[in-house]
Image (spheres, rainbow, N blue to C red):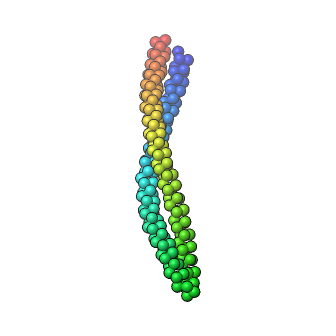
Amino acid sequence: MEEIIGAAKQVATASEGMEQHSVEGNDLIKQIVNQMEIIRDTVQDLPSIIYVLETRFKGISKILAVITTNLNQTNLLALNASTEASSVGETGKGFSVVVDEVRKLAEKTEASAKDIAKLIGETQAEAEEAVFSMQKSLKEVESGITLVQSSGAFFEKISKSAQAVTNQIKSTSSNSSDILENSQTIV
């Protein structure tokens, strides 16, 4: 009988350990859910940040359009000034050199403006890809949260079952002790 009581106590101790591990696992699941929710909240903010950047890029593109228009007008003015300088003859040669330099400067600036516009276009396309990727990531995070929450519910069931088993074993152990005590009293 004492062996049965000893075995019951060992099982009760093991069951308590199992219950404790189950509680710790459930706590860990809760921490994981919390962390996943933080990640979700962070990812949710990114598309709006990228949208602000896209809006600014559009503003820069409008400014570049104005610069390009002004450069085209500068080229036209330089061409007209060059024509006027050549019609004046030898006297206009000095002015013709200045006009030619203005035209070259306008062409370089126009090329740079085109490069900037190209970079902005590429960056906008990459920003759109980033938004798409973040939206996809957000869906995956949501799926992860759902899975982890399901795992948490499962751990909760395990914890309750372990607690019920522990209580049953403790009750059996206590009853066995009472039986042993009563049997020793009878003898």
**Position above or below: 108 against 38:** below
Q: Is residue 89 in view?
A: yes
Of residues 87 and 124, the one nearer the viewer is: 87
Q: Residue at x 46, y 28 (%)?
A: 158
Q: Is residue 56 in view?
A: no
**Position above or below: 43 against 147:** below
Q: Residue at x 45, y 44 (%)?
A: 135
Position of residue 9 measured from the top left corner of the image (x, y, whole percent): 52, 24
Looking at the image, how many numbered discs can be counted on the residues?
A: 0
Of residues 19 and 94, the one nearer the viewer is: 94
Residue at the top extreme? 187
Residue 101 position by quadrant: bottom right
**Position above or below: 15 against 123:** above
**Position above or below: 19 against 181:** below
Of residues 72 and 45, the one nearer the viewer is: 72
Position of residue 152 measured from the top left corner of the image (x, y, whole percent): 45, 34
Q: Residue at x 50, y 72 (%)?
A: 75
Position of residue 69 measured from the top left corner of the image (x, y, whole percent): 45, 68
104 on left or right of 168: right
Q: Residue at x 52, y 85 (%)?
A: 88
